[in-house]
Image: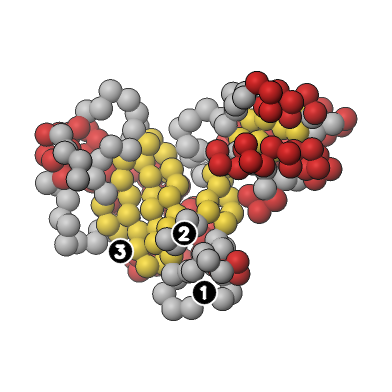
Amino acid sequence: MPRRGKKYLEAKKLVDPNKKYTLKEALELVKKMCELMKRNFDETVELAVKLGVDPRHADQMVRGSVVLPHGTGKPVRVLVFAKGDKAKEALEAGADYVGAEDLVEKIQKEGWFDFDKAVATPDMMGIVGRLGKILGPKGLMPNPKAGTVTMDVAKAVKDLKRGMIEFRVDKAGNIHVPIGKQSFTVEQLYENAKAVIDALLRAKPATSKGQYMRGVAVSSTMGPGVKVDPNQVLEEVRK
């Protein structure tokens, strides 16, 4: 077990390990702990959700995307694989890089990854598919389920710039996503978290049985986790 620093241990004392907080209470605690630890960077605040699905079955895979109302707090560099009018649309929408075979070659031969998100038109996937083994492990491969393989490249670019994030359940049935920075207000973090929960509910597989949302927690990059009452979260989202 890794040794924890003095600031971390002091911050952890603020959390009752036997209590499940409301979402707002938990986010307020995360902010207080960040202030107490005084890291020299703006920590990311993360949401973790344990889902009642078995990802080993294809029909229980939970994957999608959501635009956070207040963004992620991080600038996003967007690359678009497109040609002709679609390339022009992407540039006008604010894409940082637009190209086709030239960009595929640059990534393959130069190991170039100066971008955070990639979008492609469906007709480009024939050549973009060559990058599957390179972009896939880095989470950069365009995917229709995440809204990054689309003919509406302008909307995709604008959504990504505004703070669209992707989510995908891992082998243990967990979802981990950023919902902002410690410098955000509690209300901003709260609204971003609610947007993610709502998207997860809409992505619930028809084959999922029993309790779908089994556990929820929030934390900062280097801070202790705070457990949230999943039933309370569901009530808040459904209001």
Q: Position of residue 108 (x, y in %)?
A: 68, 28
Q: What amino acid is found at the position of numbered circle 1 in the picture?
A: Ser
Using residue 158 as the reference point, say whether residue 174 is left or right of it. left
Frontmost residue, 86 versus 170: 170
Q: Position of residue 107 (x, y in %)?
A: 67, 27
Frontmost residue, 224 versus 61: 61
Name the element at disc 2: loop
Q: In the figure, residue 124 lies in which quadrant? A: top right
* Comes first in the chain, label 3 or label 2: 2
Which residue is at 52% across, 51% downward?
Answer: 167
Regarding residue 51, the answer to whether it shows in the image is yes
Q: Which mark is residue 208?
A: 1
* Comes first in the chain, label 1 or label 3: 1
| In the depicted structure, whether residue 190 falls above or below residue 169 | above
Q: Check if mark 1's residue and mark 2's residue have beta carbons within 8 Å.
A: no
Which residue is at 45% across, 47% downward?
Answer: 177
| Number of other residues with Cα within 10 Å of mark 2, as a class: few under 14, some 14 to 19, many 20 or more | few
Pointer 3 residue:
229
Q: Position of residue 89 (x, y in %)?
A: 79, 31
Quadrant in the picture for the N terminus:
top left
Name the element at disc 1: loop
Which numbered mark, 1 or 2, is in the foreground of this view? 2
Which numbered mark, 3 or 2, is in the foreground of this view? 2
